């Protein structure tokens, strides 16, 4: 149960592997089922053997189909294994409640949204591969690949297979041949620090290697927003406390506090407006995403200077 598709897929794969004696899995979308079809899918075979059905997206099941799922879970047919996926949330909540009352085992797969959770996921991937990664390597991988969990998992697997020794920032940078230095987050860091030439150089490199302009504006927006949120926090609060409030790792809070030098609330507001305008240009209102991003970076640096 949950919205994190990679974790859901892995949980389903583990359950299917554990129930391999039941036969080949049948993968069926719940939204397309009509009344009575589930009973047919789980009916005993004329040739004997078990039955393994994976029912995807049960939050979209029709009311009468949901009732059939509940009935089968209450009294499963012999040698039938039924695996259900559900996105959680309000939709299909009655089905979840009924299955919970029946004691149906649940694997939680919540959406990973916080930076710290992604970092923990990367560390776990490397531990599973019997590799060690320093924090610098974990952060560099996030900068290089982004936040998509599938891409992060694939990147961890590639690094674990293709490199040796401890995975640190230099290993990631060498493996991605520049991509790690050219993300929306690193561009944002240079811009809010007032390093215009470096920010523009990284922007051009990012666009050249295929980084989406939308991801770059997202990185700029996050960098500027963090300036405002961390700047409004009490100066006496520890990094860990501020990190919990704003949803960022403590190491990031320390960096943002250093970046805040030279910024005022008015300057942050101007920078946010520049990013919002660039976002609109990138998403269709402008003719050149690259030009819109260059203007936004110049405005961000200029807002800091005026501040």
Image (cartoon, rainbow, N blue to C red):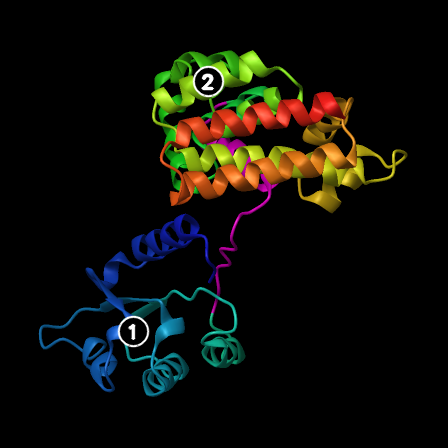
Question: Residue 272 bears which disc, if any?
Answer: none
Q: Is residue 70 left or right of residue 112?
A: left
Is 20 on the left-hand or right-hand side of 73?
Answer: left
**Against 102, is 244 above or below?**
above
Q: Position of residue 68 (x, y in %)?
A: 33, 85
* Magenta stretch in the rendered image: 105-131
Residue placed at 39% from the left, 79% from the top? 73
Rendered location of residue 258, percent (x, y) = 75, 22
Residue 301: x and y in percent read 64, 22
Residue at 50%, 76% (x, y): give it.
93
Magenta residue check for 297:
no
| 271 horizontally vs 15: left or right | right
Q: Is residue 170 visible?
A: yes
Q: Answer yes or no: is residue 168 visible.
A: no
Place residue 39 in its image quadrant.
Answer: bottom left
| Residue position marked by numbered label 1 in the rendering | 31
């Amino acid at each position: 149960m949950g919205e994190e598709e990679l974790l859901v897929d892995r949980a389903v794969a583990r359950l299917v592997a554990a129930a391999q004696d039941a036969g080949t899995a049948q993968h069926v979308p719940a939204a397309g089922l009509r009344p009575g079809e589930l009973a047919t899918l789980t009916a005993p075979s004329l040739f004997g053997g078990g039955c393994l059905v994976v029912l995807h997206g049960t939050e979209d099941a029709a009311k009468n189909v949901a009732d059939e799922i509940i009935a089968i879970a209450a009294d499963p047919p012999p040698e039938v294994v039924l695996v259900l996926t559900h996105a959680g949330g309000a939709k299909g909540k009655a089905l979840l409640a009924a299955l919970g009352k029946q004691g149906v085992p649940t694997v939680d797969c919540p959406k990973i949204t916080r930076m710290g959770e992604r970092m923990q996921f990367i560390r776990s991937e490397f531990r599973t591969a019997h590799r060690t990664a320093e924090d610098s390597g974990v952060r560099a991988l996030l900068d290089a690949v982004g936040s998509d969990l599938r891409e992060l998992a694939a990147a961890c697997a590639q690094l674990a297979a293709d490199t040796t020794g401890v995975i640190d920032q230099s290993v990631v940078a060498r493996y991605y041949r520049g991509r790690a230095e050219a993300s929306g987050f690193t561009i944002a860091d240079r811009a809010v620090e007032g390093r215009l030439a470096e920010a523009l150089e990284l922007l051009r490199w990012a666009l050249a290697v295929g980084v989406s302009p939308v991801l770059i504006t997202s990185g700029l927006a996050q960098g500027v927003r963090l300036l405002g949120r961390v700047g409004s926090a009490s100066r006496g609060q520890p990094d860990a406390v501020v990190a919990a409030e704003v949803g960022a790792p403590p190491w990031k809070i320390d960096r943002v506090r250093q970046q805040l030098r030279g910024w005022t609330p008015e300057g942050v507001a101007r920078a946010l407006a520049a990013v919002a305008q660039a976002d609109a240009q990138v998403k269709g209102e402008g003719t050149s995403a690259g030009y819109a991003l260059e203007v936004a970076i110049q405005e961000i640096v200029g807002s800091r200077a005026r501040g």
